[in-house]
Image: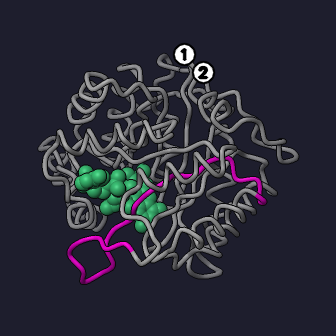
Amino acid sequence: MAGRKDSAVQRSPLPTSGQPQPQRSATVSILQSYPPGRLGLSFELFPPKSAESEAAMWQTVDDLVAWEPALITCTYGAGGSTRGKTLEILAGLRQRHGVAVASHLTCVGSTVDELRGYLREAEALGVTAIVALRGDPPKGETGFQAVDGGLSYASELVALIRAEFPRFGILVAGYPETHQEAVSPQADLENLKRKVESGGDVIVTQLFYDNADFLRFRDACRRLGIQAPVVPGVMPVTNFAQIRRIATLCAARLPESFTRAFEAAGDDETAQFEAGVEFAAKQVEELVAAGVPGIHFYVLNKSPATTRVLEAVGIGGGRA
Ligand code: FAD
């Protein structure tokens, strides 16, 4: 698979360098990130905790913009712990590369007025879109509890943004393997439909390692009348520690072919990296062949694995 270029797909036409672009109608511009016949790439970053990791993150960004992403997103820490840093990273991305950016935002620990305050700040910084989320219950708590004057579900946050901040594009989370708290897969899909009907433009999925799960999920969305683009979330795994983390954090099922590839790599870190890249490249290649509108890479602030996957699959890119 390495070095294949014959499945090249055109990239998104969104600009990535020079001055920040004027805001257009966000719904139109976010959907333009996924036009028919072109693949919209997005890269997800998280706010770094030290000066050293921040420098590494900016190097990653500088490497990855060469792939002309439609969107770069930055996560929002539990309970708003990264509020200021998330905004700072997004503002830096706008200034440095003029790329379209999306802020993740959760309902955890915030009143509606506090959420409005964040959205106003994000809008003033030229953020294009919001990944509207409920968030996880704080550590040690089993169920999600909205604060007084806060919101209980992502669908409510989507409705708030659509009503009061119509310039934002809105992305919502989808779960190919069903959200852990959902009472049933069907109830989870109906929630997803509610998020889209409340104003969600694009669905970005939780990471998964078996494309069959994603394809079943996409079919189920369509059967339920959900027409929004469904963008698969892909996280190239490059070492055993990440595998353990995935299993505990989001309970993504790891197919046998995946674990076999890692077992064959043994303790050799380079071999583990290569196995992870090869698996992710095959996964992305199949997804592109299945006609996905884009790929959302969980890049974990590092570029080598994502770069290698993009090179292997030959997805457009000035460097492909
Ligand atoms: P919701 O859509 O509100 O769903 C939560 C649960 O409630 C589901 O089980 C759903 O089925 C159920 N539900 C929804 N509505 C109803 C209803 N009316 N009645 C009964 N049940 C209902 N977390 C962070 O903290 N920061 C981030 O930056 C972040 N980024 C993410 C990005 C992506 C692409 C994804 C997939 C997840 C991200 N998460 C993030 C994790 C996310 O916050 C958790 O998965 C969280 O547990 C659920 O958020 P949600 O927006 O999907 O919630």
Q: In the depicted view, which residue is nearer to us: 210 or 182?
A: 182
Is 294 magenta? The answer is no
Q: Is residue 272 visible?
A: no
Say what amino acid the circle numbered 1 marks: Gly
Q: Give the percent coordinates (x, y) of residue 61.
A: 65, 55
Q: Residue at point 31% right, 23% down?
A: 222
Residue shown at 71%/62% (left/top)? 120
**Mark 2 and mark 1: Cα distance apart in space:** 7 Å
Mark 2: which amino acid?
Gln
Q: Are marks 2 and 1 in contact (CB under 8 Å)?
A: yes
The magenta stretch is: 124-146
* Of the pair 78 and 89, the residue shown nearer to us: 78
Q: Is residue 219 above or below residue 136?
A: above
Where is mark 1, residue-wise?
Answer: 37
User: Which residue is outermost to the front?
Assistant: 149
232 up-or-down from 304: above or below: above
Q: Which residue is mark 2?
A: 10
Q: From the viewer's side, name the closer residue of 242 and 37.
A: 37
Q: Indicate the secondary structure of the residue bearing disc 2.
A: strand
Position of 144 relative to 175 (above/below): below
- Give the side of residue 196 with respect to residue 276, left or right: right
